[in-house]
Amino acid sequence: MACPKVLLRWCLVLLVVAVSWPGPAEAGEVIVPVAVRASSNQKDGDESAWHVDTLRLGAKAFDARTGTNGPFGLIGYPGCVSTDQARYPGHDWYQGEPKERPKPLGMWMTAEDGHKDAWVEFELPAVIELSELWIWNWNDGPEIGRRVRSLVLRTSTASTGAGQLGKVEYDGVSEKLVFRDIGHIQGRRPDVVFRFPKGTRSRYVRLEKINNFGPDRMLGLAEVFVLK
């Protein structure tokens, strides 16, 4: 069994690697959507609570240097972990309900009975060549049944003008994404990292046919980042 000094040395080595590993700004820049809409939104007092706009605001507030996005749930890059995970920020699990990261601002959730074939669509600032999609699943307990089980990713080559949410023709990428069954954990890294086929260009991104693990009658996501 390795002594504590040896383990500490390896941890420090991995931490140095993690810090020097290409961050999201180098691996791909997070695109801030100009608009987002969803099949439904949960309202809990404040209308902004659990609203899908938190996904847009989370991307807008993201700081690639620190891996945080203010009150929207991301808590920074992991330290002593494998280098293949080092470039992905971790998401809070709200165990202590921190005041600086209010739980209702950290995740989107559908209305009750909105758990079948839910959808979210994003409008980006322009037609952009896309590199990756990062999705963090619902990360609260004990309602882990709200976690997404699968969804279908769509893009568009036909709809290129601004302000077309709700009437976009999604004729581009069509890919089913299946989520691993990972429960409620601190520092949750993206559950899905999808790499777009080279040359994929789109102004609109849609996540549809979203279903959950159940038995909850709502579902939700913590973060959705589209990268260029």
Image (tube, grey):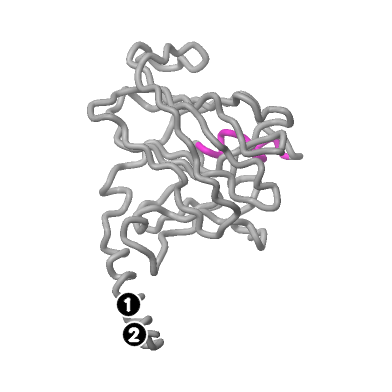
Is most of the magenta stretch helix, strand or loop? loop
Image quarter for residue 147?
top right
Q: Residue at x 36, y 75 (%)?
A: 11
The tag on residue 149 is none
- Residue kind at label 1, given as amino acid type: Trp
Give residue 27's position: percent from left, percent from top: 27, 47
Instruction: Give the residues in magenta.
Output: 46-55
- Classify mark 1: helix, strand or loop: helix
Above or below, 198 against 59 in this view is above
Q: Which residue bears the numbered disc 1?
A: 10
Residue in view at x 60 percent, y 54 percent: 184
Q: Are marks 2 and 1 in contact (CB under 8 Å)?
A: yes
Q: Nearer the viewer, residue 49 or 77?
A: 77
Tell which of 177 and 73 is nearer to you. 177
Q: Position of residue 194 (x, y in %)?
A: 37, 37
Q: Which quarter shows the N terminus?
A: bottom left
Determine whether, in the image, residue 134 is placed left or right of residue 42: left
The residue drawn where x is 41% and y is 60% is 77
Q: Position of residue 170 (x, y in %)?
A: 41, 15
Relative to 185, residue 43 above or below? above
Is 186 or 104 nearer to us in this picture? 186
Which residue is label 2 attached to?
6
Badge 2 amino acid: Val
* Percent position of residue 207, x then y: 49, 27
Quarter of the image with the C terminus in it: top left
